[in-house]
Image: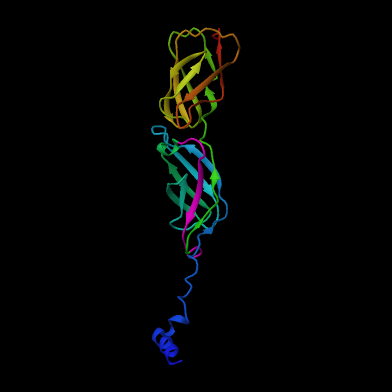
Amino acid sequence: MATLLGLLCACGTGLQTSPPDAGEAPKEETLPPITLEEIAVTNHETGALTVRVRGENFSDGSLLVMTRRTLLTQVVSSTELRATIPPSFLEEREGLYLEALTTSAQYPHGARSPQFGFNIPAPELTSVEPARVTMGSPDPTTVYLYGKNFVRSSVVLFRGVMYPFHVVSPTSGVVNLPARLTLGDEELEPIHVGVPAPISADTNAGWLRVAVPFP
């Protein structure tokens, strides 16, 4: 009996207690879902894109992340973020997504929105000026094209021939068609802009009429 008491005294309280339970680490919370309000080319020289995202509970320091890459982000308000996407971020092409991250008094351990998938924007052609040009002109015919997501190195396709396209901005450019245009097979003929980046594609058709000169 004395021996047993001696052992218990020697061990102290170590046999009676265990280390305190540290519990689980605080978890990151979930922001409300985001929506993509706009994505468009804003620099025709580099092909960089700008995105505008809507959501809730944004604060100073909130960030947009595109497929695991942090974007240079502007916090416009508690419901709007804007960010620039460099062309190098678009090399993967598939499986792209956006998500918003924030840390604030409301989310002291951080919060992340559900992922929002998006596609690289295709170029668009909205108008052709003038819509009517004169056949047989001895000089090249200048045509202005307006649309969206134009970048440098784009070309104009007309009657199966490619012509250099001078891109003035992501929404406008100029092409000089050759002198002495002839009448086409149709009254209205399609004209397209071919854009190499950020997505290689031709625009929808604009329409150009090559007409006989007025008497």
Q: Position of residue 213 (x, y in %)?
A: 54, 9
Q: Residue furthest bottom?
A: 2
Q: Residue at x 44, y 84 (%)?
A: 13
Q: Residue at x 50, y 69 (%)?
A: 23
Which residue is more in the foreground, 93 or 37? 93
Q: Is 147 situated left or right of 86 in this image?
A: right
Quarter of the C terminus within the rendering? top right
Q: Position of residue 87 (x, y in %)?
A: 41, 36
Residue span colored magenta: 92-107
Which residue is more in the foreground, 103 or 131? 103
Which residue is more in the foreground, 125 or 176? 125
Quick check: is 93 in the magenta stretch? Answer: yes
Relative to 21, residue 131 above or below: above
Q: Position of residue 98 (x, y in %)?
A: 50, 46
Main SS of residues in magenta: loop
- Residue 91, picture quadrant: top left
